[in-house]
Image: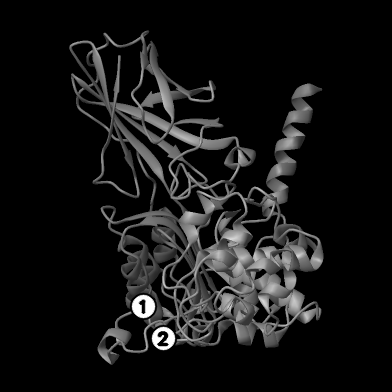
Amino acid sequence: MKKINTILLLLWGFYQVFAQQIPRSSPEAEGVSSAAIQKFIGSYQKDKHELHSVMIIRHGKVIAEKWASPYAATLTHSMYSVSKSWTSTAIGFAVDEKRFTVEDKVLSFFPEYADLEANPFVKDLKIKDLLTMSVGHEKEPMRSVVVMQPDWVRGFLNAPIAYQPGTKFLYNTLATYMLSAIIQKATGQTVLDYLQTRLLKPLSIQGIDWEKDPKGINTGGWGIRVHTEDMAKLGLLYLNKGKYEGKQILSENWVHEATTKHIDQNPSASQAKKDSSDWLQGYGYQFWRCRNGAFRADGAYGQYIVMLPAQDAVVVITSESLDLQDDLNMIWEHLLPAFQKEKLKANPKAVQALQKQSIALSPIVSDIKNGDETWFGKTYTLSKNPFDFTQLQLERTGKQITLQIQTKDQKTHRFGLSQEAWNMGETNLLGPYLLRSARVDLAQLGPFKTAASYYWQDAKHLGITLRYLQSPHHWEMILSLEEGKLNLKIMNSYEPKTEINVTGM
């Protein structure tokens, strides 16, 4: 009976994810060449683009979808600034419900901070200025607030405003956090809870979460974790002017306002520079305008929802990219000309070739299968490091290795490592992350799904890869022994040329 119940729970889990999928079709049936899509996917160069998933939608139907194993459709993927477009959507619902307008003053929602109203321009600041990234800061206060201060609202309002709000663009993630705080003040719900009945349920989106600040406010500008198909659903909602499956979910007026250019990023940029950049086409309400009449939700290291109204298409990407403009260039070069007005002749061979195209991320393989094992079974006390690792131990059983890491909170974290294969697991150890130092209880989102492997770089150097499968990032580690001292090099994948050196005795 216990086995049957387990199977039923697994089936229910798959149903929760897949029961309300976007309809599927073939590329040619929707006027797109399978060969062009294959060329687009093949254009990703692994030295600067690590593709995790891609989904292409045409005429409301998914015509291509891939996940790079060990990443998978069933796993959510952490968003950086794509989160902003979800927060903007919540603001749209609140405006539609007449809870406030975009012209309302920010300080009116926070009377408890009235002591800050004498600060320059604070009384002038409007919701619209938050939405359009035109607060007026000379420097974004993001890190100084989220790392150093327990009260982020006060930290934001206390940051010096140098220019008249609404006049100068400066990308400002903490401004989006303030939108989240306003939603919570106006509705009594977090952004995520507020979106449940208004957006998530109508779009059949389940199993997502969102980071919170020390006061329980969703971070707004980053930190939502969603499935690739959830991103596609949001894209379809905006592509179809607020309609989903024929029903008006969000007002057409808000969609128009949110995706219209309200401010130039750099008014003094030359036309030649504007013509070559998707970051100089104007900014809406937490949506970027693109070249070719498109607009997008955009997140650091290559998370995208690109909506192409003229082509009736949406392109969704999750990745770890070190060249964001090139990501979009590949869409314009390979996909844009492939969208045809009429259906194409069926091409089963091309469809089959596209389906067989693999973007799997394989573990590192070495010709050296064994190396120095004198460090196994020993516990090493580590030097001070930014990860707060305090001890490390390696154990070997046959070809399997167990990596054990202790952190300064006295917690022990274990990872099974396989050679030339991924060892799937989960952990509560916080992984590589740009905002790892923010005052956010990331552990509440755990356990985190992982894939881990090892290889011998040579007989004296052991390499370890730790992938966090709900994140754009992973760790690479190189371990060696020198006169009984452990040398540990750790690389965050988003800074592949930066080595963090840790020693152990």
Q: Judge the density around disc 1: few (<14), some (14-19), many (≥20) Cα neighbours within 10 Å.
A: some
Residue hosting label 2: 292
In the rendered image, the residue lying farthest to the bottom is 271
Q: 49 or 280: nearer the eye?
A: 280
- For image coordinates 76% across by 65% down, the residue present is 185
N-terminal of the pair, mark 2 or mark 1, is 2
Tell me which corner region of the image, top left, top right, bottom left or bottom right, holds residue 189.
bottom right
Q: In this view, does 480 lie to the left or right of 467?
A: left
Residue 80 lies left or right of residue 10; in this view the side is left
Determine whether, in the image, residue 281 is placed left or right of residue 445: left
Q: What residue type is labelled 1?
A: Trp
Viewer can see residue 493: yes
State which quarter of the image contains the N terminus. top right
Name the amino acid, label 2: Asn
200 lies left or right of 222: right
User: Percent position (x, y) of residue 130?
Assistant: 58, 75
- Give the percent coordinates (x, y) of residue 243: 71, 79
**For residue 98, above or below residue 215:** below
Q: Badge 2: few (under 14), some or many (20 or more) residues near its Cα, within 10 Å?
A: few
The location of residue 384, given as percent across then percent down, is 36, 28
Tag 2–tag 1 contact (CB < 8 Å): yes
**Which residue is pictured at 71% across the width and 54% down the height?**
206
Name the residue at 54% across, 79% down. Answer: 132
3D distance between C-alphas at marks 2 and 1: 8 Å
Residue 92 point in image, percent of width and height: 70, 77
- Residue 176 vs 261, above or below: the answer is above
Q: Is residue 273 above or below residue 492?
A: below
Q: Quadrant of the C terminus?
A: top left
Query: Circle 1 is placed at which residue position?
Result: 332
Using the rendered image of the protein, determine whether residue 199 is visible from the camera's viewpoint: no
The kind of secondary structure element at disc 2 is: helix
* Secondary element at tag 1: helix
